[in-house]
Amino acid sequence: MSEDDTYTPMRIGARNPFVWAEHKLNEKIEWKNKDMKWEDKQEKLEAAFDGRPYSELFDPIYGSPLFVQTGDVRPCTTVSNPTWAINPAGSNYTKTSRAYNDLVQGDLPDCYFIAALSSIAFVAVTIPNPNLIPDKPNQPYTYTFYNSPTQAASVTVTNLLPLDANSNYHYSKSYTLGEIWPAMYEKAFAKWKGSVTDDKPDYSIICQGDPLLALMNLTGWKFTTFIPGPGADPATSTATRYSTQDFTTGTQIFDKIKNYACKPLGPVYRVAKFPMVAYTYPTAPPGITYSNATIVANHSYSVLGVHTLGADTYIVMRNPWGQKGAGYGSGDPVFPGALASGAWWNVVDLADVNDAIFALKTDVFRNYFKGFGWVSP
């Protein structure tokens, strides 16, 4: 998975506050309703988190419940005493439609896994496809994961999912009504990580993790880590995982992603040709503030490609929460260096808060993100 023998897996993960708020308030909230104002979104989130200010939700430094706190030895909070049953909100596997922008992370802080799965769907990498009939209850689904590019293992699960006392499902889902393929991948991953033999895996085992390892676990493709040192130049390196601080400017990061991990689809569009992710710092470094749902501390994002607008260069990403902010007005999300208008490839309008896709100026990306990388055959 890496040429760096000292590589230590990262522990990245922030819960989806939009999903968690619905369960905390016991209310179905139409976050994607275009008539829902940003003030209303913030009010709902603050109410769900016991009046905690919206701006303090997105960095563990404030003790936000969206994170498993550093040094916390307690297990990640999961559904207590779940009932394992078919999700009443959806039981259709939908094998033929794995849309990258359908994936929505749930209550678990496993953004690293959902961002990785969305990235894989975006580049249309062939991932294990259970050859099963969706309308047969309890028909087993088999998935293959990789401990290393040469070491694979398969696990089998049913479509019974952990529901709470009100028969609500808390974990990852699809925006397409009735689809359960994200939920099934998440369940299978939990079973594989926990090495359990029954059909009731412990989901706490997948709370926080490493998005690059998740990409490798899902594809069997490898990544290599750039190691700074005398003569080491990230601009010419063929490594596939980098710290943003390996580069002196955001433009160098743009060139690295554009030249090594993207393919052109037009004069300004470059889309990812390999599954790619980026991740933020565990807590805000000096001079940086994580204060809204666009850029969040200790969080993973899918990297979809790059974009050029005049002299400005951008990294295009997707937030696995399925939203990209509760807003600061009509230009939602207004974030330093965010491209909040216009189209990118098949994204009609980057100003739409409900597609979770946004473009960030490369210098801002360098400051707010800790690292990025991709896997390749």
Image: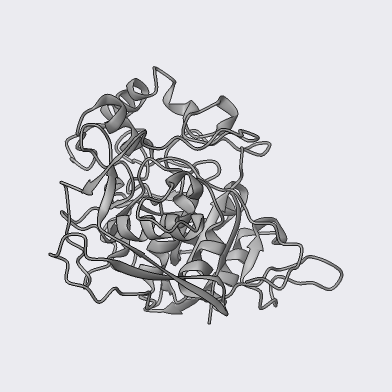
Q: Is 264 positioned to the left or the right of 45 in the image?
A: right
**Position of 174 relative to 21 (above/below):** below
The residue positioned farthest toward the right in the image shown: 230
Q: Is 245 positioned to the left or the right of 101 in the image?
A: right
Instruction: Measuring from the top left, give residue 222's x and y in whole percent.
Output: 58, 75
User: Is residue 316 something that shows in the picture?
Assistant: no
Name the one closer to the observer, 340 or 107. Answer: 107
Instruction: Measuring from the top left, give residue 78's x and y in whole percent.
Output: 41, 37
User: Is residue 200 something that shows in the picture?
Assistant: yes
**Position of 160 relative to 329 (above/below):** below
Q: In which quarter of the image is residue 82?
A: top left
Residue at 61% across, 33% down: 72
Name the one closer to the observer, 47 or 344. Answer: 47
**Position of 228 relative to 90 (above/below):** below
Count of all numbered marks drawn on residues in the image: 0
Q: Quadrant of residue 326?
A: top left
